[in-house]
C-alpha cells in the first residue's frame, strides 16, 4: 500500500509539473532546434552543450546529436561547445521557430591548447546526472593497451566505482554488483558476452566506437533491466563528407574500417572488421597439432537523413570466437545484433525515436567422435520494440516518456547425437520464453537557477510465458531428492508467472557556484533475467534464464551523493561521490551446483542479498599537452546467501578495498606522444582450504569460510609511445606507429590460487601422493608490443 | 563439461606462469571423516573413520580407532564390523549386499553416534570388453608402448533414472588422473546401446585392464561431482566457488557412506 501511494504521488507530481510548468509564464515562446555535427566527417556530436548567456538557458544534444531550446522572442548568442572542438557562437534572431544545424571544427592541433571562451565545458558540474562517465575513445587510443588493442572494457575497469576480477578478463563489477548486473548495449542492442579469448579482449573494436557511456547510478527512467549499470556503446555513423579508410595491424589482430557518403551529407555508411590471425600461424605449425584459435568482429552501419524531420539508421554487429582442437573438437561462441532506428521530429520540440532491436548469443561445442562425441548448442535470442519520446516543453522542463517491449527466447541446451554409433541420444532442455514490458515517464526540470531535478518512474512488467512445463516440487530447494508432485503445461504465450515492479528514479543537482555543484540521486532497479553461472568471471558457456516460478526478480536500491568541481577554466574536472547499494533476490546457487544441462536447474537456485558502499574520486584533465585521468575508489561489498558460509555474510568475489588508477597521455611534439597507465588494486578475496582429507584416494580440500583470504595486491605500469610521421600535404595517407610495453616493471601479479597434489614441474607426484600444494597463477609478465595504423 | 572448461583455459595457459606458494592458513578443528562402501560383491565392504588434517600435513588422515561400527539392512540383518587396521573397519563375518535392499550405518566414536543410509541400486552387467589399437597414439604415444584402447560394451536401462561411478584399473592400479577425477555419470544423455566406448586411458601389451561400474544414488553422484569441483577448482575465477562436499552422514561427521550395486569386467591386453 505504501508503495502504491508513493507511486501515485510521484506520477501526480510529474503530471502537475508537466501541465503546470509550460503554461506558467503566459508569453510567446519559440524553439531553436537542430543537429550538431563534426564539420569534417558529418558525424553527430552527442551530449554537446548549447548555452545562451543572457537568459542562462542551456541544453545538451541527445544520443542522436539533436537539441532543442525554447525561449521568448529576442536576439540570442548561442554558444556550442564540445570537448576537442572549437567552440562556436551563433547569433539567432528568434521571431519564429528556428531550425539550426551546426557544424563544429575539431580543435586545430593537439599541441595548441584549445582556447575556451565559454563556461559550458563544465558539463560534469552542470548536468543533473551523476555517477555517469564517458569513456574518452580518442584518448584511450593514445594509452597503452594489452598487445596494442585499445579496449573500451579494459578502460572501464579503471574508472572509479568499477573493479575487475583480474587482468585478462572482460568482466567488470560496478559498485559491488556482479558481472551479470551490467546491461551492455551496442547501438541499443544488448551484448550478452563481451569477451574474446575468454576475456583477454572485448568485442568492442575501438575504431568504430563513437562514444561509450557508463551509468553507475542515478539511472534515468528510460533505462532498466539490470541492477548495477548500463554501458551504452554507440558506433560511428560514417563520414558523410568523403570516403576514408582506417586500419591497423597489431600483434594480435588486423583491422580495417571503410566509411563514406552514399549521398553526400544525406546518407553515409561505415563497415569495420577485425580479425585475429594467430590461427593462420597455428594451423601451419606442427607444434599446435591442429589447434587453432581465432576471433573476429564485424560492424556495419548505414544512416540516411531523409530530411530534417526523419532519419534512419541500420546497424549490425556480429562477432565470434572459434576454437578448434586437433580437428576433432571445436567450440565457438558469439553475439549477433541488429538495430533499426527511426528518429522523427513531430515538431521542433517533440523528438521521437523508434527502435527495433534483435540480439542473439549462442555457443556450440562439437566433438566429432562418432562414439563419445556430440553436438551441443545453446542460445538466447531477443527482439525488442522501443519508442522513446522527448518533449522539450520549456528550457526548464523536458519530458521523456516511452515504452519498451521485449520478446525473449532461451534455449539452454540441445544435444545432437553424432549418429547410430554414438553412446548419446539426441535430447534437449526445455526452451523458456518471456515477454518484458516497461513504461516510463521522466522529467528534467530546472526548478531554480541553482536547482535542477531529474525524476521519473519506470514501471516494469515481466511475463514468463509458455510454451513450457512447470514442475511442482515437493521441496524446490532439495537438489538431491527431486520429488515432483505435479506438473502444469502451458501453451504458447500463456502466462506462467507475472512479475511487475515500480522503479522510481530521482536525481538532483544544486549549483554551489559557477564551478561546483552538489548532486544526489536515488534509483531502484529490477532485473528479470539471470545468468546461470557461479564463477566470478562468466564463461561463454553460461546460459541465461528468465524470472520464473522458482526464480524471482533481483532488486536493488541505490543512493548516491556527489560533489563536482572544475578548476582552472575547466582544465580539470573533479568529482567525489559516495554511494550505498542494497540488493536482494540475487541469483546464487547451491554449493557445487550442477549448472550444465540440468533439467531440474530450479532446485539449484538460492537467492541472496548484497550490500555495498564506497567513496569514489575522479580527476580528469581533458585539455593541454597532458591529458588523462586519475581515479581512486574505497569500497566494500558483501553478500549473504542462505546455506552458504554458514549463513554468514562474506566478501563478494570482486570486493577490493582500494582501487587506484592513473591514465595519462602526453603530447611531446606534433609527431610524438607518450602514454602511461598505472593501476593498483587490493587483492581480491579467495576461498582457501583450512585443511584437507583423503577420501578413496582423492585429496579433498576442507574449507572453513567463503572468501576468507585475499590475494596479494595487484599493481602494474604500462607505457607506450606513438609516432605520427609528418603528413605529406599532397597525399591523404597518414601513418602512425605505436610501441609499448604492458606491465613495464614485470610485476608478477597473482591471478588466482589453486591447489593440487604435490608434484614436480613435469607432473610427477612428489612423495607418497598424500601431500598437497598451493599454486599461484600469474598472467602477463612484461609484454612489449608494436602496432601500425593508417588512415586515408 | 568441466573438461571443456579446463580446455578453455588453454588461452590463459599459453601466457600464464605459476609457482608454488606457501600459504599462511588458519587452523580449524579437525572434522571426523567417514568413508564407507557396501556392495553386492564379497570382500568390498569397509568403513574407514579418520579425521581431517592441516592442508600441509603429510600422510593419510589420522585414523580414528576404537569405534563401534555396524551396518543393518532392511531385512533385519545386522553386520558387525571390526577394526582391521587403525581406523579401517571390515565385516566381522564376510557378507555381500543385495540389490534393492537399504543399508544403514551406525558408527559410535566416543560419545558421538553417526548414521547414514542408502539403497543398493541395480547396475547393468558389462556385455564385454575388447581391445583396439589407436593408430594416432601408436604413431606418437605419450607413454612408451601404451597405445591400446579398451572398449566397453554395456546396455543402459532406459526405463529408469540411473547414476553411475566408473573405476578403471591398469594392473590393479586405479586410474583417476593421479587422484584428480572421479568418473561419475548420469544417464540423461545416454542411449541404450553403449558400444565401442573407449575408456579414457591407454594400455600396453600385456596389461590387465579392469573396469568397475557402481550404481550410485543421485546424492552420491552429486557428491562425486562436488568432489571433482573441489579438487579442480581454479580458485573461483572461471570455475564455481570452492565449497565443501555434501555428506550423507548424520551426527556431525562428513564424508560419504556409499551403497552400490557393482559389476566389473576385465581383459588382458593382447593383439
Image (tube, coloured by chain):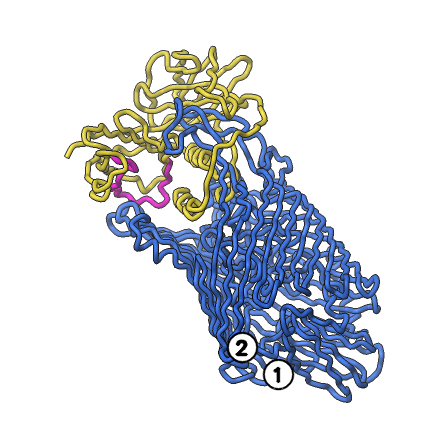
Chain colours: A blue, B yellow
- Residue visible at 71% across and 86% down in the picture: A98
- Side (left or right) of A673 relative to A694: right
Q: Give the labeled residue for mark 1.
A: A309
Residue A241 vs residue B30, the one in the foreground: A241
Q: Is B198 covered by the magenta stretch?
A: yes
Residue under the point 73% across and 57% down: A575
| CA separation in Å, label 1 and label 2 | 20 Å
Question: Any magenta on residue B87?
Answer: no
Residue A697 picture quarter: top left
- Residue range (magenta): B184-202
Q: To which chain does the residue with label 2 belong? A: A
* Residue B59 drawn above or below residue A453: above
Q: Residue A271: image x %, image y %? A: 47, 72
Do the residues at pointers 1 and 2 share their chain? yes
Provide the secondary structure element on which disc 2 rests. loop
Front residue of B195/A230: it is A230
Label 1 Cα crowd, 10 Å radius (few <14 / some 14-19 / many 20+): some
Residue A10 position, x and y percent, is 76, 63
Question: Residue visible at 30% across and 39% down?
Answer: B157
Report if the CB atoms under discs 1 and 2 are less than 8 Å apart: no
Q: Left of B48 or right of it: where is A675?
A: right
Query: Left of A573 or right of it: where is A686?
Result: left
x 21%, y 42%: residue: B139
Q: Nearer the viewer, mark 1 or mark 2?
A: 2
| Relative height, residue A199 to residue A18 (above, below) | above
Label 2 crowd (10 A; few <14 / some 14-19 / many >=20): many
Residue A313 lies, with reference to residue B166, above or below; the image says below
- Residue sticking out furthest to the bottom: A95
Depth check, front residue: B125 or A523: A523
Chain letter for the residue marked with disc 1 in the picture? A
* Residue at mark 2: A239
Amino acid at each position: 500500500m505504501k508503495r502504491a501511494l508513493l507511486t501515485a504521488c510521484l506520477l501526480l507530481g510529474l503530471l502537475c509539473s508537466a501541465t503546470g510548468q509550460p503554461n506558467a509564464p503566459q508569453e510567446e515562446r519559440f524553439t531553436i532546434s537542430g543537429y550538431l555535427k563534426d564539420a569534417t566527417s558529418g558525424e553527430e556530436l552527442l551530449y554537446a552543450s548549447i548555452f545562451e548567456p543572457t537568459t542562462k538557458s542551456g541544453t545538451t544534444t541527445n544520443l542522436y546529436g539533436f537539441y532543442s531550446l525554447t525561449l521568448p522572442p529576442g536576439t540570442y548568442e548561442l554558444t556550442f561547445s564540445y570537448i576537442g572542438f572549437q567552440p562556436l557562437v551563433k547569433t539567432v534572431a528568434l521571431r519564429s521557430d528556428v531550425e539550426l544545424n551546426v557544424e563544429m571544427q575539431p580543435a586545430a592541433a593537439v599541441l595548441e591548447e584549445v582556447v575556451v571562451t565559454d563556461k559550458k565545458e563544465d558539463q560534469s558540474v552542470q548536468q543533473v546526472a551523476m555517477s555517469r562517465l564517458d569513456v574518452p575513445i580518442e584518448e584511450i587510443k593514445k594509452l597503452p593497451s594489452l598487445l596494442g588493442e585499445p579496449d573500451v572494457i579494459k578502460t572501464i575497469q579503471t574508472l572509479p566505482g568499477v573493479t575487475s576480477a583480474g587482468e585478462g578478463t572482460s568482466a567488470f563489477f560496478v559498485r559491488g554488483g556482479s558481472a551479470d548486473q551490467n546491461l551492455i548495449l551496442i547501438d541499443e542492442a544488448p551484448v550478452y558476452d563481451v569477451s574474446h579469448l575468454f576475456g583477454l579482449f572485448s568485442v568492442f573494436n575501438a575504431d568504430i566506437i563513437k562514444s561509450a557511456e557508463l551509468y553507475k547510478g542515478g539511472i534515468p527512467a528510460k533505462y532498466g533491466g539490470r541492477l548495477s549499470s548500463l554501458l551504452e556503446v554507440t558506433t560511428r555513423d560514417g563520414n558523410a563528407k568523403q570516403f576514408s579508410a582506417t586500419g591497423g595491424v597489431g600483434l594480435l589482430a588486423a583491422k580495417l574500417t571503410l566509411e563514406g557518403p552514399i549521398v553526400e551529407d544525406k546518407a553515409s555508411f561505415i563497415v569495420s572488421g577485425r580479425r585475429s590471425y594467430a590461427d593462420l600461424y597455428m594451423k601451419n605449425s606442427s607444434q599446435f597439432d591442429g589447434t587453432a584459435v581465432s576471433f573476429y568482429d564485424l560492424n556495419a552501419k548505414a544512416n540516411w537523413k531523409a530530411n530534417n524531420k526523419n532519419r534512419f539508421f541500420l546497424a549490425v554487429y556480429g562477432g565470434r570466437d572459434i576454437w578448434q582442437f586437433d580437428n576433432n573438437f571445436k567450440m565457438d561462441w558469439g553475439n549477433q545484433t541488429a538495430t533499426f532506428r527511426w528518429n522523427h521530429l513531430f515538431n521542433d520540440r517533440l523528438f521521437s525515436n523508434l527502435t527495433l532491436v534483435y540480439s542473439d548469443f549462442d555457443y556450440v561445442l562439437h566433438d566429432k567422435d562418432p562414439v563419445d562425441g556430440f553436438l551441443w548448442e545453446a542460445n538466447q535470442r531477443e527482439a525488442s520494440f522501443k519508442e522513446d519520446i522527448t518533449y522539450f516543453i520549456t528550457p526548464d522542463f523536458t519530458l521523456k516518456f516511452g515504452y519498451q517491449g521485449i520478446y525473449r527466447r532461451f534455449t539452454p541446451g540441445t544435444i545432437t547425437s553424432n549418429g547410430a554409433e554414438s553412446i548419446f541420444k539426441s535430447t534437449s532442455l526445455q526452451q523458456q520464453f518471456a515477454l518484458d514490458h516497461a513504461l516510463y515517464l521522466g522529467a528534467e526540470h530546472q526548478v531554480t537557477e541553482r536547482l535542477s531535478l531529474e525524476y521519473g518512474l519506470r514501471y516494469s512488467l515481466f511475463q514468463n510465458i509458455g510454451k513450457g512445463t512447470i514442475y511442482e516440487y515437493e521441496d524446490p530447494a532439495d537438489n538431491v531428492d527431486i520429488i515432483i508432485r505435479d506438473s502444469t503445461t502451458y501453451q504458447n504465450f500463456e502466462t506462467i508467472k507475472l512479475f511487475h515492479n515500480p522503479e522510481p528514479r530521482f536525481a538532483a543537482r544544486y549549483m554551489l557556484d559557477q564551478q561546483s555543484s552538489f548532486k544526489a540521486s536515488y534509483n531502484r532497479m529490477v532485473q528479470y533475467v539471470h545468468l546461470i553461472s557461479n564463477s566470478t568471471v562468466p564463461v561463454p558457456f553460461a546460459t541465461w534464464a528468465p524470472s520464473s516460478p522458482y526464480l524471482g526478480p533481483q532488486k536493488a536500491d541505490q543512493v548516491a551523493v556527489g560533489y563536482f568541481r572544475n578548476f582552472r577554466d575547466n582544465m580539470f574536472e573533479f568529482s567525489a561521490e559516495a554511494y550505498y547499494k542494497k540488493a536482494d533476490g540475487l541469483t546464487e546457487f547451491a554449493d557445487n551446483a550442477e549448472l550444465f544441462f540440468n533439467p531440474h536447474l530450479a532446485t539449484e537456485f538460492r537467492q541472496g542479498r548484497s550490500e555495498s558502499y564506497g567513496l569514489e574520486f575522479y580527476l580528469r584533465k581533458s585539455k593541454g599537452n597532458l591529458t588523462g585521468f586519475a581515479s581512486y575508489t574505497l569500497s566494500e561489498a558483501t553478500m549473504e546467501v542462505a546455506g552458504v558460509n554458514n549463513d554468514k555474510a562474506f566478501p563478494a568475489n570482486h570486493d577490493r578495498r582500494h582501487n587506484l588508477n592513473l591514465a595519462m597521455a602526453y603530447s611531446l611534439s606534433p609527431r610524438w606522444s607518450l602514454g602511461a597507465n598505472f593501476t593498483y588494486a587490493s587483492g581480491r578475496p579467495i576461498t582457501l582450504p583450512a585443511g584437507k582429507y583423503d577420501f578413496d584416494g582423492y585429496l579433498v580440500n576442507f574449507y572453513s569460510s567463503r572468501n576468507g583470504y585475499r590475494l596479494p595486491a595487484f599493481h602494474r605500469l604500462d607505457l607506450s609511445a606513438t609516432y605520427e610521421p609528418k603528413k605529406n600535404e599532397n597525399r591523404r595517407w597518414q601513418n602512425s606507429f605505436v610501441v609499448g610495453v604492458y606491465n613495464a616493471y614485470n610485476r608478477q601479479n597473482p591471478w588466482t590460487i589453486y591447489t593440487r597434489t604435490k608434484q614436480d614441474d613435469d607432473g610427477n607426484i612428489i612423495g607418497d601422493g598424500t601431500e598437497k600444494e598451493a599454486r599461484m597463477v600469474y598472467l602477463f609478465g612484461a609484454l612489449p608490443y608494436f602496432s601500425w595504423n593508417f588512415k586515408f | 563439461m568441466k573438461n571443456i572448461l579446463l580446455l578453455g583455459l588453454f588461452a590463459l595457459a599459453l601466457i600464464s606462469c605459476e609457482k608454488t606458494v606457501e600459504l599462511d592458513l588458519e587452523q580449524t578443528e579437525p572434522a571426523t571423516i567417514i568413508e564407507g562402501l557396501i556392495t553386492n560383491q564379497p570382500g568390498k565392504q569397509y568403513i574407514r573413520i579418520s579425521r581431517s588434517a592441516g592442508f600441509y600435513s603429510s600422510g593419510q588422515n589420522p585414523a580414528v580407532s576404537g569405534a563401534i561400527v555396524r551396518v543393518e539392512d532392511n531385512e533385519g540383518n545386522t553386520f558387525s564390523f571390526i577394526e582391521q587396521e587403525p581406523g579401517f573397519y571390515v565385516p566381522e563375518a564376510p557378507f555381500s549386499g543385495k540389490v534393492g535392499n537399504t543399508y544403514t550405518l551406525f558408527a559410535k566414536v566416543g560419545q558421538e553416534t553417526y548414521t547414514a543410509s542408502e539403497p543398493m541400486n541395480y547396475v547393468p552387467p558389462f556385455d564385454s570388453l575388447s581391445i583396439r589399437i589407436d593408430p594416432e597414439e601408436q604413431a606418437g604415444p605419450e607413454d612408451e608402448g601404451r597405445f591400446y584402447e579398451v572398449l566397453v560394451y554395456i546396455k543402459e536401462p532406459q526405463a529408469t533414472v540411473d547414476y553411475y561411478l566408473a573405476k578403471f584399473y591398469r594392473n590393479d592400479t586405479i586410474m583417476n588422473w593421479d587422484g584428480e577425477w572421479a568418473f561419475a555419470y548420469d544417464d540423461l544423455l545416454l542411449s541404450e546401446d553403449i558400444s565401442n566406448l573407449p575408456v579414457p586411458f591407454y594400455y600396453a601389451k600385456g596389461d590387465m585392464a579392469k573396469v568397475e561400474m557402481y550404481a550410485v544414488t543421485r546424492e552420491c553422484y552429486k557428491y562425486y561431482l562436488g568432489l571433482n569441483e573441489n579438487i579442480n577448482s581454479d580458485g573461483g575465477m572461471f570455475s564455481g566457488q570452492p565449497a565443501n562436499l555434501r555428506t550423507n552422514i548424520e551426527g556431525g561427521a562428513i564424508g560419504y557412506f556409499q551403497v552400490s550395486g557393482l559389476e566389473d569386467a576385465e581383459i588382458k591386453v593382447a593383439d
